[in-house]
Image (spheres, rainbow, N blue to C red):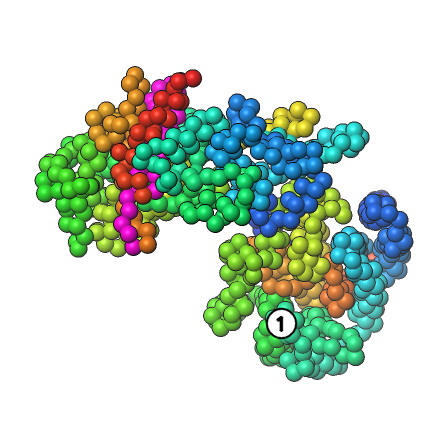
């Protein structure tokens, strides 16, 4: 009886997951088609209208099923990535770029990276050497921009290699999750602490304060979740606050950011311009938005990366913006749920590290765009334009999905054993 | 392990709580500030919408069209030059030189951002160019034009900058919001920008000045509330000047009033008495009462952007406290806010939110909802308001405000002569605030004349004319 109910439950759940995927597919198909029809026929738009639903279906229903990954998580990540492509595609028509189609490439590559990470987590059983190699590579990578980096928008966090540009701090974010959770589970405090200190120092030198904030807050969350040491956590928080005050007094650009946050209208034409335009855009939209493909998104500098949340709010309204935030909240909830169901300390911490990194990054940028906290230029996970950012977020989700699939394996193994025990005649 | 799982849950809850705070903050700011942000001159959506939507009309409370649009969507204003000039700070000008005028601040209505989907589909099917909503204001253009004329031609007010506010103290509806100098919105705006006294500046809501003796309304409220036995207290004005610490506070024109009660002091506007009373009160209570009347508050009215008024929060010496009690020192207030102070006394201590929007009609005639009177704050208890009202009636009957008296009407008022310095020259700004205490004419008036002289001689006579016009219909 119990077994039958269980099967009914799984059937219903599968049905619901399928429904979710269909709704998503219809949403994006109609959205891209609408844009295509609105301003004359355009093959790019039509291609996206067909391709995106296909990608969503294939990855969520087939690949996630095959790899025993979490389908809900997969569906949400797909939605956010496709939303990013959609928003970039709408602004392309105004600004005359082809960022939408480029982002589709990033999205596809990101999916590949994500499945590689799932396999990586599933295949590797002994983590000692892989983590050591990762540690060495990460230290080099994070220091590299200090030496040969190029300054963009006040932060020296880009490097250019043979025509390619990349942001090492984004890549190191992934290894940070692995390194922290591995050494924490091994109870080797100083190893991860020194690594984190190096990262923070390098990021400060690069003046990449947003990323530094993400690294630090996520590490603090992970440290507390692992150790439960309130005293040290508070000490870390106090140290960070002290560093923030010092940073405020030491750096001119931090003062500008804070001033722009306090009152973006007072220095409207310079430091406040970005935030003022963002607020105007959000205010113009109200709760339900001005409509897909309408509005003036390109008034906001960096609308395609840091401020893409403002574009979403402008076109779809603040309610949809909150809906997007709910999706991130679901990612956090799933991440926690996966972390709780792990058997090994390392996997639990890994899942939690991914959750904390993605959650903090989302909060810091959305809070900045909505003028809740001072703005620090980081990307909105999965949605913002950018290859490195997309790949690192997808890799993080891949790690989480890998842990999830290991959980699934073990649950299946357990139920097989219990079935076998049941089948044996009682002695 | 179980504890660790619990900590995982706590941390996830923390992350979600952070996102929830961000979302709630977003909803809060958009619902509070969106009209202010939308009306900002940096909003290019405004220009963009102007190219596709014909802006709606702006009408006064009697249906006089203040601003409308021709077939191409170009803004045209009232035919009468006098009306155009008088109303310009309310309607705005084509180049949006006046921040937060109705044309920009109410753009979300005028440009049809509030139009429902049904209406949009309706206009789409009819094939017409979309029209925005018509906005009906609470102002009376005829009255405002008359006041502007009187201001411009009056013996003492001619050529001086100033502001006049008339509001209904029961509902908060603004009947007149006049700023002088004004200009013709259809004139040569480049030339107008060069004129002296910044004509683009809406003084009624943006010019913050020392309230002078009109602030004694608030000092009296504080004395009545926080000084027991205030009714019997006597203040010493035998010498005509009071020394507080290193500050000497003289009376205007060095008058000598002898020993005076609060009522007498209010009637003759005795600085000595109020300076002594403020020092006895202490800065805490004076500040608290001023804040009850809206000082130091961030004004977020639905229909108007008003400069915040300030009462110093860090009064260190009794000397400064004494100056503050008579409305000098670092006190700053707009004419509109002073009108609200008088309105609060008239309305049994309840200050109404000033309103400029009487209603909004969609292009197909649908009335939009939500334009109702709203209390802004309770400024003081009704019994104190009644006491101050009797003081203010005395002022008009036999005190400094006699020139505001209109025969057959019960009028309360307070004059003010605020000393200030412009380019190191001592100047006196004339103030008068008052109201008609008749149930059928619930109007409060504030007249402010920059560098005009004394309130009793300059501002009160104009107020008298306004009272007469308000009751003549």
User: Residue at coordinates 83% horizontally, 45% vertically from top-left?
Assistant: A38
* A2 to the left or right of B138: right
Q: Nearer the viewer, residue A126 or B78?
A: B78
Q: Is residue B426 magenta?
A: yes
Residue assigned mark 1:
A155
Quadrant containing the N terminus of chain A in the rendered view = top right
Question: What range of the chain is rendered magenta?
Answer: B424-450
Residue B217 drawn at (x, y percent) = 28, 35
Secondary structure under tag 1 reads strand
Q: Quadrant of residue B185?
A: top right
A183 or A296: nearer the viewer: A296
Q: The numbered mark 1 sits on a residue in which chain?
A: A
Q: Quadrant of the C terminus of chain A?
A: bottom right
Using residue A279 as the reference point, say whether residue B298 is left or right of it. left
Q: Residue at x 51, y 32 (%)?
A: B81
Residue in the image at 46% along x and 42% along y: B202
Q: Position of residue A67 (x, y in %)?
A: 86, 62
Number of other residues with Cα within 10 Å of mark 1, as a class: few under 14, some 14 to 19, many 20 or more: some
Task: Name the residue rendered at 57%, 28% in the picture.
Answer: B65
Expressed as whole percent of the image width and height from the top left, the position of residue B327 reads 28, 43
Query: What is the magenta segment's predominant secondary structure?
Result: strand
Q: Position of residue B121 (x, y in %)?
A: 77, 32
A300 lies above or below A159: above
């Amino acid at each position: 009886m119990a077994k039958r109910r269980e099967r009914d439950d799984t059937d219903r759940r599968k049905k619901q997951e399928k429904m979710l995927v269909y709704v998503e597919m219809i949403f994006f198909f109609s959205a891209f088609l609408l844009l295509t029809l609105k301003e004359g026929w355009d093959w790019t738009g039509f291609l996206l209208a067909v391709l995106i639903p296909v990608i969503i279906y294939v990855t969520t229903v087939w690949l996630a099923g095959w790899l025993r990954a979490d389908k809900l998580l997969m569906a949400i990540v797909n939605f956010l990535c496709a939303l990013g492509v959609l928003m970039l595609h709408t602004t392309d028509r105004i600004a005359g770029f082809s960022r939408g189609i480029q982002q589709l490439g990033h999205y596809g590559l990101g999916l590949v990276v994500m499945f590689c990470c799932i396999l990586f987590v599933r295949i590797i059983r002994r983590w000692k050497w892989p983590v050591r190699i990762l540690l060495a590579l990460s230290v080099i990578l994070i220091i590299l921009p200090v030496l040969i980096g190029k300054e963009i928008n006040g932060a020296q966090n880009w490097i250019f290699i043979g025509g390619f540009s990349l942001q090492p701090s984004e890549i190191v974010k992934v290894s940070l999750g692995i390194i922290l959770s591995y050494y924490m589970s091994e109870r080797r405090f100083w190893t991860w602490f020194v690594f984190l200190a190096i990262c923070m120092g390098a990021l400060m030198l690069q003046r990449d304060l947003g990323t530094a904030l993400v690294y630090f807050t996520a590490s603090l969350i992970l440290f507390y979740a692992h150790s439960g040491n309130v005293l040290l956590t508070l000490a870390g928080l106090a140290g960070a606050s002290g560093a923030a005050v010092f940073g405020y007094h030491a750096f001119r650009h931090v003062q500008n950011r804070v001033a722009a946050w306090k009152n973006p209208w007072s220095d409207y034409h310079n430091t406040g311009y970005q935030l003022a335009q963002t607020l105007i855009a959000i205010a113009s939209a109200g709760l339900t938005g001005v409509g897909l493909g309408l509005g003036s998104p390109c008034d906001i500098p960096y609308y395609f990366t840091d401020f893409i949340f403002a574009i979403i709010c402008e076109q779809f309204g603040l309610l949809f913006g909150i809906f997007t935030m709910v999706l991130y909240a679901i990612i956090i909830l799933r991440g926690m749920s996966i972390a709780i169901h792990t058997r090994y300390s390392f996997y639990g911490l890994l899942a939690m590290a991914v959750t904390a990194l993605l959650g903090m990054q989302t909060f810091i940028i959305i809070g900045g765009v909505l003028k809740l906290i001072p703005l620090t230029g980081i990307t909105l996970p999965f949605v913002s334009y950018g290859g490195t950012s997309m790949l690192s977020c997808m890799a993080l989700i891949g790690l989480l999905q890998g842990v999830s699939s290991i959980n699934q394996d073990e649950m299946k193994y357990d139920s097989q054993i219990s079935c076998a025990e049941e089948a044996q005649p009682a002695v | 392990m179980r504890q660790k799982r619990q900590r995982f849950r706590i941390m996830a809850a923390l992350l979600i709580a952070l996102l929830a705070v961000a979302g709630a903050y977003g909803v809060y700011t958009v619902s509070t500030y969106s009209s202010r942000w939308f009306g900002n001159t940096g909003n290019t959506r405004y220009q963009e919408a102007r190219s596709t939507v014909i802006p709606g009309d702006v009408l006064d409370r009697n249906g006089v069209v203040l601003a409308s649009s021709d077939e191409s969507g170009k803004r045209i204003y009232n035919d009468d030059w006098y009306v155009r000039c008088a109303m310009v700070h309310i309607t705005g000008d084509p180049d949006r030189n006046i921040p937060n005028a109705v044309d920009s601040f109410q753009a979300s209505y005028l440009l049809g951002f509030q139009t429902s989907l049904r209406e949009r589909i309706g206009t789409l099917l009819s094939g017409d160019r979309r029209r925005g909503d018509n906005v009906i204001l609470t102002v009376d253009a005829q009255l405002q034009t008359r006041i502007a004329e009187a201001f411009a031609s009056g013996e003492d007010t001619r050529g001086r900058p100033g502001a006049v506010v008339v509001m209904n103290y029961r509902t908060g509806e603004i009947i007149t919001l006049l700023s002088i100098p004004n200009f013709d919105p259809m004139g040569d705006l480049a030339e107008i920008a060069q004129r002296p006294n910044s004509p683009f500046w809406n003084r009624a809501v943006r010019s913050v000045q020392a309230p002078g003796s009109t602030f004694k309304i608030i000092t009296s409220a504080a004395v009545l509330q926080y000084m027991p036995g205030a009714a019997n207290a006597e203040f010493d004005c035998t010498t005509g000047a009071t020394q507080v610490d290193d500050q000497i506070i003289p009376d205007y024109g060095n008058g000598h009033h002898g020993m005076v009660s609060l009522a007498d002091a209010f009637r003759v506007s005795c600085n000595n008495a109020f300076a002594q009373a403020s020092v006895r009160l202490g800065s805490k209570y004076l500040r608290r009462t001023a804040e009850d009347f809206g000082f130091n508050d961030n004004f977020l009215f639905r229909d108007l952007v008003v400069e915040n008024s300030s009462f110093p929060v860090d009064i260190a010496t009794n000397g400064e406290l004494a100056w503050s009690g008579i409305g000098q020192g670092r006190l700053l207030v707009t004419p509109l806010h002073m009108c609200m102070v008088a309105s609060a006394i008239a309305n049994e201590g309840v200050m109404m939110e000033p309103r400029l929007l009487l209603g909004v009609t969609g292009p197909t005639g649908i009335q939009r909802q939500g334009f109702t009177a709203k209390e802004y704050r309770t400024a003081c208890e009704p019994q104190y308001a009644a006491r101050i009202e009797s003081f203010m009636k005395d002022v008009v009957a036999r005190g400094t405000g006699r020139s505001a008296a209109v025969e057959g009407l019960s009028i309360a008022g307070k004059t003010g002569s605020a000393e200030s310095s412009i380019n190191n020259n001592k100047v006196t700004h004339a103030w008068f605030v008052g109201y008609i205490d008749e149930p059928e004419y619930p109007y409060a008036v504030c007249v402010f004349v920059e560098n005009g002289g004394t309130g009793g001689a300059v501002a009160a006579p104009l107020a008298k004319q306004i009272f007469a016009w308000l009751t003549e219909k």
